[in-house]
Amino acid sequence: MAIDNTVTITGNATREPELRYTPSGQAVASFGVAVNRRWQNRQTQEWEEAVSFFDVTAWSQLAENIAESVAKGTRVTVTGRLDQRSWETPEGDKRSKVEIVADDIAVSLRWATVEINRNERSDSGAFGGAAPAGRPSGGGGGAPAYNPDEEPF
């Protein structure tokens, strides 16, 4: 039995993406997404609303593209996996949180227009350089990359 940890949410960016680099030069971006849920209360016939907030982290080229393309308020669809992090504060308190580690992010064309600029592929693999921890680096094992400039057959 396979266990899958995939989540997809659609909501609005709650803050500008913060782009940082690890000591090895790996790009990592983080930002928040608010997801609104609205329903009609069957007893009162009033509309009610709840908001859920999610922290999102992305790596490599995706992180750099997010920092360049997403702004606070942008409507985005995030696909990724849930990841729980734990740490201890300087005062010794234990903390943990669940965040989404993004595999892909798309902006909603229902609420905005975009200009698409293709990134050049590097020879260093699918992740544009060193892979994040726990991820294989580029190439091998999948379908050939789609190239829109080539004839399909």
Image (cartoon, rainbow, N blue to C red):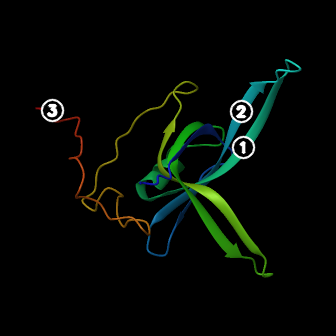
Is residue 64 rendered to the left or right of residue 40?
left
Q: Which residue is mark 1?
A: 52
Residue nearest the viewer, comparing 134 with 129: 134
Q: Helix or strand or loop: what does disc 2 sit on? A: strand
* Mark pair 3, 1: CA separation: 43 Å
Please give the name of the residue rendered at 23% of the width and 56% of the height, measured from the top-left corner: 141
**Quadrant for the N terminus in the image:** bottom left
Placement of 134 over or under 128, stated as above or below? below
Q: Which residue type does callout 1 highlight?
A: Ser
Placement of 19 over or under 34, stated as above or below? below
Q: Which residue is mark 3?
A: 152
Q: Nearer the viewer, mark 3 or mark 1?
A: 1
Within 10 Å of disc 1 (Cα), the crowding (few <14, some 14-19, many 20+) is few
Q: Which residue is mark 2?
A: 37
Taking the view exactly as shown, the residue that stands out farthest to the front is: 1
Please give the name of the residue rendered at 68% of the width and 62% of the height, measured from the top-left corner: 97
Figure quadrant of residue 24: bottom left
Is residue 65 rendered to the left or right of residue 44?
left
Q: Which residue type does callout 2 highlight?
A: Arg
Q: Which residue type does callout 3 highlight?
A: Pro
Placement of 45 over or under 118, stated as above or below? above
